[in-house]
Amino acid sequence: MASRTRRSGRASRAPGGSRRRRLPMRLLLPLLVLVALGAMLMLRGYVHSEVLADHRVGPPAANDRVPKDILEGGPVIDTRSGKATSLELPDHELVLTFDDGPDPMWTPKVLDVLKKHDAHAVFFITGTMASRYPDLVQRMVDEGHEIGLHTFNHPDLSLQSKSRVDWELSQNQLALAGAAGIRTSLFRPPYSSFAQNMDNNTWPVTEYIGSKGYITIVNDTDSEDWRRPGAEQIIRNATPKKGHGAIVLMHDSGGDRSQTVAALDRYVSGLTDKGYRFHTLTAALDAPSAHTPVAGLESLKGAAWVFLVQASEKVTGVLVAGLAVVGVLVFGRLGLMLILSVAHARRVRRRGFRWGDPITEPVSVLVPAYNEAKCIEQTVRSLVASDHPIEVLVIDDGSSDGTARIVENLGLPGVRVVRQLNAGKPAALNRGIANAKYDLIVMMDGDTVFEPTTVRELVQPFGDPRVGAVAGNAKVGNRDSLIGAWQHIEYVMGFNLDRRMYDVLRCMPTIPGAVGAFRRSALERVGGMSDDTLAEDTDITMAMHRDGWHVVYAEKAVAWTEAPESVQQLWSQRYRWSYGTMQAIWKHRRSIVERGPSGRFGRVGMPLVSMFMVVAPLLAPLIDVFLLYGLVFGPTEKTIGAWLGVLAVQGVCAAYAFHLDKERMTHLISLPLQQILYRQLMYVVLLQSWITALTGGRLRWQKLRRTGAVGLPGGGSPASQPQMDGRPVG
């Protein structure tokens, strides 16, 4: 039932008169958010070597094509002029080189030791690490160290194409430019060792890199610190013989480097006492600096790159924290639902359970209706077949399809029609309350069908004088389609299992509009139905709690409702529900600081409703985002296993909910597909609701198209059901 007012959906027209379609904002904004998050995750995977990473290492090869002068020469190889030359360091000149960094844990410790001894070194950085930790690269430069390239992703370049080699170098330079505002002419190939180990596969790469203006630096003294042989052995491995100069290989990243740091302090101190000097490479060779400042577009590109990488790191960190939060919320909710629904079922199903004295007094049933011509006859006939004395008031809210006339022509006993100009569902319900004869009032939708026992079961909790309202068990009647089956699972598990939990916690958030009952006195005390929100059922339920009434769940009060049968209809309904729930939470926010029953609901119910109905669904897409991330970047097996584990837990909860409601388990076959497709739609709907709320937009009621296909299960249309005690009352 909805207001007649609708938002215009007119498409703009181009100057020539042709119709030009625009992507709806409800799709555009969520899509932009998802694309931005996807881009951030892709960038994160890129700089963490999870994209385009190649961990292959080429096997040894012959070296007959490598110049003899290179094989027998020093560790500094220069092919820039087209001629291959090599250099060795002068005696007592040591160049400490550190590969694979910078590392946030070990690089600062290495820098601290070098600063302590006023020693300098060359750091061969990877682009991935430099992009993530630019402050450490800047510190290296500020403290007088030299920077060399070690590629972006650390692949074996002998297995790569020239275009990939160019890309590795340019991306490494881009990261260096963004981190420290410089370029460098020094390069060390990954997986390199001594010049004598150059072979026919690595030598062409060295020549090509020289043609690009780089000097290749290998080493002639390997500390083998990567083996973690102990500080003493690292020192022995790194000490040159007979006072010769050397380029010493160490690592400041790639694993636990505690032994390297421990050895470094003693190593530098001991060799300094023996007359060795620790310089940068160009200082040791008395050559111009390898660093060149960058400016202009190159500087801007580097700064933009580092900024985006840092943003992706922060965004990913936030997403991981959000994933942890949603994990706690999802599993906490599932655990609470299972435990408390068991407690609820045991309480209400134990032998001899009674709410109080049986309720036999007549009940007024209100049916607000706007253009329900296809459904209203079945709805009214199902009520007349009730086994509890009732009066039926159909409040026609300005229908234009003859809804009121259809009801009047039925001539059913105990059924009255109240007409009003179109004013919306809350106004129609208030009009019905004013015209109702009895103190117990049942409310339902015009597209809903009651079983003969529904009204009787729905009002029995009023035997407890503390109960002010009762939520019934709404079920999807048109569950034969795939989208209907998905909603059926959602109703049984997500709504009714939830209501059992909230009943035990005494903070039921919503009495469904399809099947709910109220005391007239309770309604009058809270001011009746309000049109302040688009979720008048949630609004009135929260108001009941704040006024001190108990709101309970009657599992046997079954109503069959017509669920939306198209994505567009479903979108409109859930968008209104989500936005209306947010409005209701905001309207009743003062309950958090109030005392008494209102304060209890505010400090128990409001946080649970906010976390489980707003925050958790909003963050839940992170589960699927990281599922896709894990499938693309790995570890794929663990990712699939984790997702299947979550699905199994949800399957257990769903199976238990179906068991409680005595539903056939066959519908759960579509649960995996529901988790993959249906949930994504609900995510986008909720995200759109958040955007509407944050931007101050106002959502109007929209009428859902009905088919009138819902009848009582097993018996066809209610019109064919036996009319049980359909006598008029009063």
Image (spheres, grey):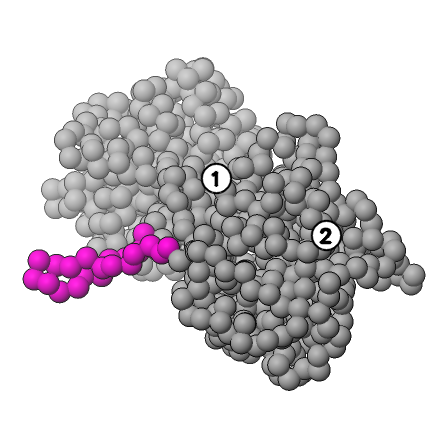
- Residue 210 in picture, x, y percent from top left: 18, 44
How far apart are the alpha carbons under marks 2 and 1?
Answer: 52 Å
Residue 96 seen: yes
Q: 595 or 30: nearer the eye?
A: 595
Residue 333 located left or right of residue 271: right
Can residue 336 be seen at all in this image of the molecule?
A: no
Q: Amino acid at mark 2?
A: Asp
Q: Which mark is residue 160?
A: none
Stretch of the chain drawn in magenta: 5-25
**Helix, strand or loop for the magenta stretch, by majority:** loop
Q: Give the number of the disc on residue 439.
A: 2
Q: Is residue 590 above or below residue 631?
A: above
Residue that protrudes farthest toward the left in the picture: 16
Q: Secondary structure at mark 1?
A: helix
Q: Which residue is mark 1?
A: 318
Q: Residues within 10 Å of mark 2 (few under 14, many from 20)?
A: some
